[in-house]
Image (cartoon, grey):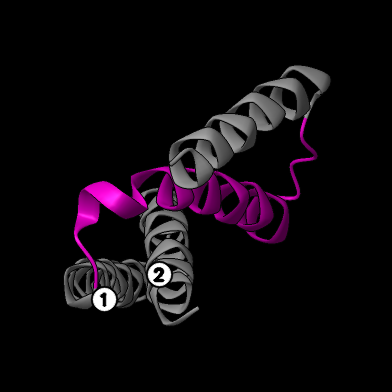
Amino acid sequence: MKMFAFVLVAAILEASGDAILRLALHHQSLPSRVCLFLLGSVLLALYGTSLNLAPVDFATVTGVYVATVFVAFQVNSYLFFHQIPSPPIYVGGALIISGAMVVTLWK
């Protein structure tokens, strides 16, 4: 469970940092753009730190991480950009999550 907490935090930080950098690229005000770039950069640095502090070898959490980051990106896509996932994204997401379960649970 501790491993999943690191992965979840990392996925949320990565997806949020990426979304904030995307907002910064399209923001009109230069001071706001600089602040958004700084915030996004800090979140992405925290993502890398969190993922590398996870108490398990990265290869063993790859499946869980990929599925978690997929979900985090979809949630942030909705929250930041009001984009609702399309049917292909739902189907692809189901395949990603299924693959993560195979990678994680197959012993």
Placement of 62 over or under 5, stated as above or below = above
Left or right of 1: which side holds 40?
Answer: left
Q: Nearer the viewer, residue 99 or 86?
A: 99
Q: Are marks 1 and 2 in contact (CB under 8 Å)?
A: yes
Q: Position of residue 84 (x, y in %)?
A: 80, 39
The quadrant holding residue 31 is bottom left
Q: Position of residue 67 (x, y in %)?
A: 53, 45
Secondary structure, mark 1, is: helix
Left or right of 95: which side holds 10?
Answer: left
The quadrant holding residue 52 is bottom left
Placement of 15 over or under 35, stated as above or below = above
Q: Position of residue 9 (x, y in %)?
A: 44, 75
Secondary structure, mark 2, is: helix
Mark 1 or 2, nearer chain start: 2
Category of crowding for the residue at label 1, using alpha-carbon neighbours closer than 10 angstroms: few (below 14), some (14–19), many (at least 20): some
Kind of residue indicated by mark 1:
Ser
Q: Which mark is residue 50?
A: 1
Q: Main secondary structure of the magenta part?
A: helix
Identify the residue at horizontal 74%, vertical 41% (top origin).
Answer: 83
Placement of 67 over or under 85, stated as above or below = below
Identify the residue at horizontal 43%, vertical 82% (top origin).
Answer: 2
Q: Which residue is mark 2?
A: 13
Let me know if residue 13 is in the magenta part: no
Give the spatial CA distance, label 1 vs label 2: 9 Å
Kind of residue indicated by mark 2:
Leu
Identify the residue at horizontal 20%, vertical 66% (top origin).
Answer: 48
Give the extent of the magenta segment: 56-85
Q: Nearer the viewer, residue 107 or 60?
A: 107
Which of the two marks, 1 or 2, is nearer to us in this view?
1
